[in-house]
Image (spheres, helix red, strand yellow):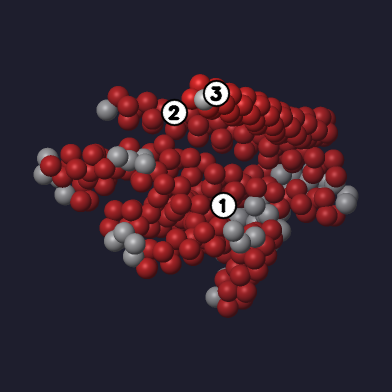
Amino acid sequence: MVKKISEYQQEANDLRVIHKDKLSTVLNLLVKISAFVTMAVLVIMIAYILITGIPNITLDQFALEYNTDNVSMMPAIINTLLYTVLSLLIALPLGIGSAIYLVEYAKKGSKFVEIVRLTTETLSGIPSIIFGLFGYLFLCIFCGLGYSLLSGVITLSIIILPLIMRTTEEALRAVPDSYREGSYGLGAGKVRTIFKIILPSATGGILNGIILSIGRIVGESAALIYTAGTLPNIAIDIMQSGRSLSVHMYALLSEGLYTNQAYATAVVLLLMVMMINFASNKIVKHMGGKNEQN
C-alpha cells in the first residue's frame, strides 16, 4: 500500500512537470511571436518612411529661409535643437534635484513623498495635448508670453519632468547602500557622498532618462502647436514663434499641398532620432565603462 501511494505521488509529480514544460513551451512561443511582430512592424514602418521619403529629399529643403517654393525644413531643424537644449536645461536640474531629495533626504513612508510620486505618475500619464492647452491658457494668455519659443520650452520641460524624475529616482535606488555606508565611514558628508559616489554610479540610468526625454521632445507636436505656434522661421529670440520638425511635418500634411515634402521631413526626423539615440547609447556605454574602471 505504501508503495502504491508513493507511485501515485511520483506519477502526479511527473504530470506536474509535463504540464509546466508544456506551459513554458507555449509561453516561450508567444514571447517569440510577440518579439517577431514588434520587429516586423518596426521594420515595415521604417522601410515605408525611407522608401517614400528619400526620393523626395532635395537640397532646397535645407535652405536657411523658408518659402513656398523650397518648403525648407532647416529652420524647423534648428528650432528642434533649440527646444531640446533649452528644455533639458530647465528640466534636468529640477528632475534630478527632486529625485535626489526623494531618495536621499526624504523620510521613508512620508505622506509628502507619496503625494509627490502620485503627482509625478499622474503627470506622466496626461496626454500631451492637455499640456498644450494648459500652456496656451496659462503661458500664452495669462502670462502674456504669446506663441513663442519660451512658451514651448516651458511646456516641454513640464512634459519631460516626470520622466526624468522617475528614471533618476530608480537609478539612485539601484545604487547599493554599501556605497553610502563606505563613504560615510571614510568621513565624507552627505553632499559629497551624493555628488562623488551616488550620482556617478547612477549615471547610466540618468542618461537613459535623458535619452527618452530627447525622443519625447523631438517627436512632440500637439503641445507645441498651441504654445510655440507654426511659423516656419528660425526663432532667433525666445519670444519669437517657431515650429519644430514634427510640427513642420504636420503643417505640410494638413495643408495638403506638400505631401511629398512631408515624407522627406519624416525621413530627416527619423534619422535625427536614430542618431541621437545612437550617440546617447555610446555615451551611456562609455560612462558605464568609466565607472567600472573607477
Mark 1: amino acid? Tyr
Instruction: Say above or below: 1 vs 72.
Output: above
Mark 3: amino acid? Lys
Q: Earlier in the sequence, mark 1 or mark 3?
A: 3
The residue sitting at 55% across, 75% down in the picture is 143
Residue 152 visible somewhere in the drawing: no
Instruction: Say above or below: 113 vs 210.
Output: below
Q: Secondary structure at mark 1?
A: helix
* Residue holding disc 2: 285
* Residue holding disc 3: 4
Neighbourhood count class around disc 2 (C-alpha, 10 Å): few under 14, some 14–19, many 20 upward: few
Instruction: Say above or below: 20 vs 116.
Output: above
- Give the CA distance from mark 1 to mark 3: 76 Å
Q: Nearer the viewer, residue 145 or 1?
A: 1
* Residue holding disc 1: 83
- Looking at the image, the residue that sits furthest to the right is 257
Mark 2: amino acid? Lys
Neighbourhood count class around disc 3 (C-alpha, 10 Å): few under 14, some 14–19, many 20 upward: few
Q: Secondary structure at mark 2?
A: helix
